[in-house]
Amino acid sequence: MPFDVEFPKGAVSISTEWAEGAGRGTVLVAHGAGAGMEHPFLVGFTDALNDLGFSTLRFNFPYREQGRRMPGPAAHAIATWLAAVECARALAPEHPIWAAGKSYGGRMASMAAAEGLEVDGLIYLGYPLHPPGRPDKPRVEHLPVIAAPQLFIEGTNDPFVQPVVQLEEAVAACQNARIAWIDGGGHSFEVKGHKRSAHEIGASLAPLVEEFAAS
C-alpha cells in the first residue's frame, strides 16, 4: 500500500510494507542511507515487533524509489516522514505511533520531530552522532527541541558515536531521552565473536522497543 509524497517537481510514490499487529500500537521503520526497507536487519526487527503485538510500517525514502544510491535533501526525507505518519494514522487511527529508523532514517525522524512531526516517541537504531572519526561534527543541535520521548539504541563500538561520552552528553541535554547500550556492538549492532544474521540482530532489539513503549 504505497503512499505519495508531493514535491515541487511532482509526486513520488513510496513503497511500504504494512503488517498488522495485536493492537499495541504502530512502529514506523525507516532504513539507513545505504540500504532500503527490504534489508534483513529491518525485516527481522519488524517481524519481532509483530510477534510482540505491534503493527509496523516499513517504507523507503524517495531517493531509493528513484534508483539513486545517495540520500537526497533532508527536506525530502522530512516530507516522507510526515506522509508516513499520515499513512499510519489512516491505517490504524486509534494506535499510538512510534517513529523508528536505522542510522540516517532515525536522524531524519529526529529532524522531522524537531520541525513539528507528532509521534508518541522516537527510536534511533544506531544514531549517527557524527561521521566516523569526526566528533567535531556533531549532529545534535536539534535534539533538545524534541518533546517526545527518545530512545537511542547504540552499540558501544559504533564509530559514529565515539567517544561515547559525547552521545551521553547530548542525550542528557534532551527533554526526555535515554540510551540502551549494546555492549560491543558496532553500527549495525554486530558484536565481534558472535555470529548472528542481520535478521537475528534486528529481531534482538525489539524487546527494547517494547519496554520503551510501555514506559
Image (cartoon, helix red, strand yellow):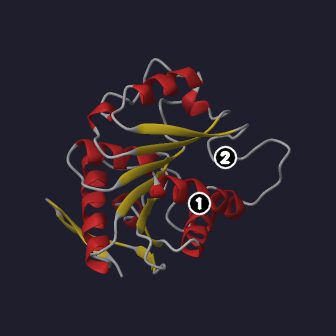
Packing grade of label 1 (10 A; few <14, some 14-19, many >=20) is many
Element carrying mark 1: helix
Q: Marks 2 and 1: which is nearer the front?
A: 1
State the residue at coordinates (42%, 38%): 177
The amino acid type found where label 1 is placed reads Ala
Left or right, 111 with reference to 70:
left
Looking at the image, residue 205 lies above or below residue 175? below
The quarter of the image holding the N terminus is bottom left
Q: Which residue is situated farthest in the right direction here?
A: 193
- Give coordinates of residue 135: x percent, y percent: 50, 20
Q: Quadrant of residue 162?
A: top right
Q: Which residue is situated farthest in the top direction here?
A: 136
Element carrying mark 2: loop
- Give coordinates of residue 193: x percent, y percent: 86, 44
The answer to whether the residues at label 2 and label 1 have Cβ atoms under 8 Å apart is no
- Residue at image mark 2: 189
The amino acid type found where label 2 is placed reads Phe
Q: Which mark is first along the chain, 1 or 2?
A: 2
State the residue at coordinates (43%, 26%): 172
Looking at the image, residue 120 lies above or below residue 17? above
Which of the labelled discs sits on residue 206, or is there none?
Answer: 1
> Which sits in the foreground, 134 or 190?
190
- Give coordinates of residue 32: x percent, y percent: 49, 52
> Which sits in the foreground, 181 or 16?
181
Left or right, 123 with reference to 114:
right
Packing grade of label 2 (10 A; few <14, some 14-19, many >=20) is many
